[in-house]
């Protein structure tokens, strides 16, 4: 059970930041992001943030480094840009 809680707490910042940034992006760029769903933005931002945290854990050897969190924020922002503002809409 401790391992489950540890994994949940490891990925919680990525999920929280991913969904919050997706919500803020939908509010700020309301017209530009009209055709992209909030669920898609949040899922991509959370997944890319989790991948960045995992990469930072592998590179630095431990969790909780500020550079790891900065990487997570950059990954969330880039994924929101890619999925929401850059990618052509069908």
Image: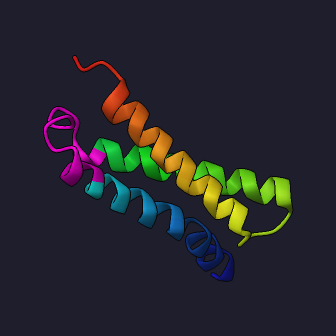
Q: Is residue 36 magenta?
A: yes
What residue sits 24% from the left and 47% below the top?
A: 38
Percent coordinates x, y for residue 24 in the rendering: 28, 57
Report the front residue among 34 and 4. 34
Report the front residue among 5 and 86. 86
Percent coordinates x, y for residue 34 in the rendering: 14, 37
Looking at the image, the residue that sits furthest to the front is: 28
Q: Looking at the picture, does residue 14 appear above or below residue 1? A: above
Whether residue 50 sits left or right of residue 89 in the image: it is right
Q: Quadrant of the C terminus?
A: top left
- Magenta-drawn stretch, dominant element (helix, strand or loop): loop
Q: Quadrant of the N terminus?
A: bottom right
Q: How many marks?
A: 0
Whether residue 45 sits left or right of residue 25 in the image: it is right
Looking at the image, the residue that sits furthest to the bottom is: 2
What residue sits 46% from the left and 39% below the top?
A: 79
Percent coordinates x, y for residue 25 in the rendering: 29, 50
Q: Looking at the picture, does residue 42 appear above or below residue 67? A: above
Percent coordinates x, y for residue 59 in the rendering: 83, 53
Q: Is residue 63 magenta?
A: no
Please state the extent of the stretch shown in magenta in the rendering.
Answer: 25-39
Instruction: Examine the image and state in which quarter residue 50 appears.
Output: bottom right
What residue sits 55% from the left and 46% below the top?
A: 75
Instruction: Examine the image and state in which quarter residue 63 appears.
Output: bottom right
Q: How is the image coloured?
A: rainbow
Whether residue 65 sits left or right of residue 20 in the image: it is right
Q: Looking at the picture, does residue 80 appear above or below residue 69? A: above
Instruction: Examine the image and state in which quarter residue 86 appears.
Output: top left
What residue sits 35% from the left and 23% below the top?
A: 87
């Amino acid at each position: 059970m401790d391992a489950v809680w540890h994994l949940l707490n490891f990925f919680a910042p990525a999920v929280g930041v991913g969904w919050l940034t997706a919500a803020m992006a939908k509010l700020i760029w309301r017209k530009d992001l009209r055709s992209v769903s909030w669920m898609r933005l949040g899922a991509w931002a959370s997944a890319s943030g989790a991948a960045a945290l995992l990469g930072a854990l592998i590179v630095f050897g431990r969790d909780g480094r500020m550079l790891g969190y900065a990487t997570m924020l950059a990954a969330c922002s880039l994924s929101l840009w890619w999925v929401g503002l850059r990618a052509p809409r069908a």
